[in-house]
Amino acid sequence: MKPIIKIDNVCKTYLMGEVEVNALCGVDVEIYPGEFVAIMGASGSGKSTMMNMVGCLDVPTEGRVFLEDRDISRLAESDLAQIRGRTIGFIFQTFNLMPGLTALENVALPMIFQDVPFDERMERAWKLLELVELGHRMNHKPAELSGGQQQRVAIARALVNDPKLILADEPTGNLDSKTGRDVMGILARLNKDEGKTIVMVTHEADIAKYAERTIHLRDGRVIDDGANGARK
């Protein structure tokens, strides 16, 4: 089986004033279809930079990044945007919902950019809200929803274009522990039952245990990459 993601000797250097900051240093990682992988590390370890590489949000200074066997390291932003829209679903810590739109409209929004007809957008968005048990709140705006409900909307939105890869950046960071467990249960089911490949950044060891495998970063380098024990 070929990896869905291959990070090949990737380095990323940022210029902060006159100082060079090495966010990633010679990272080699392969992630295979259907895996659930957690990325952990202290602040400044490089985990967000690594997520940005996988998500076509940034390109390496050195090395190459492959998504489904395609080298995305040097693609133009317009090409990266198309890949993001078709292949990747994003879930953010801060939800990133449009405050003026209902839950249904927020979920349907990404389909506009893929030229999906209106009726199909609404039907697909409603079915996904039902999947995350929010069909009864589909006409509510984000301010009328709890944090956990907003994150469920964000999960539904991430699924609308049937992505092969879901990237979750601290998906429970703004949630209480019980709500966080509920959200992680949804992600675990998407991985197990739907076969979605999930890559998740977290700083919480209890949350990382939902994944099958954890990659630990320190100072921009992989210091450990191995299977977790029994999943929750």
Image (tube, helix red, strand yellow):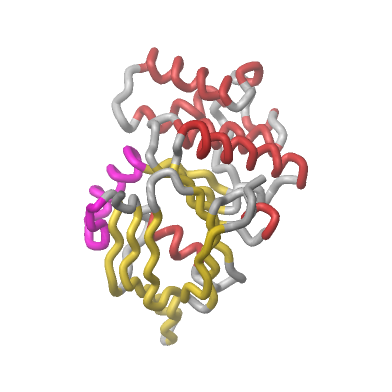
Q: Which is nearer the eye, 106 or 29?
A: 29
Above or below — where is 76 with respect to 18? above
Which residue is painted at 23% across and 62% down in the image? Answer: 74
Q: Which is nearer the eye, 2 or 198?
A: 2
Q: What stretch is highlighted in magenta?
A: 69-87
Residue 197 lies left or right of residue 217; in this view the side is: left
Above or below — where is 208 with respect to 114? below
How far across and down, in percent of the image, does residue 130 sit? 58, 20
Residue 175's quadrant in the figure? top right
Which residue is painted at 49% across and 33% down in the image? Answer: 157
How far across and down, in percent of the image, does residue 59 sit? 32, 63
Above or below — where is 38 with respect to 137? below
Q: How many numbered tags mark residues here?
A: 0
Q: Is residue 70 magenta?
A: yes
Q: Does the magenta stretch include residue 17?
A: no
Residue 39 lies left or right of residue 197; in this view the side is: right
Residue 81 lies left or right of residue 21; in this view the side is: left
- Farthest residue toward the bottom? 18
Q: Which is nearer the eye, 54 or 206?
A: 206
- Farthest residue toward the top? 119
Which residue is painted at 42% across and 74% down in the image? Answer: 24
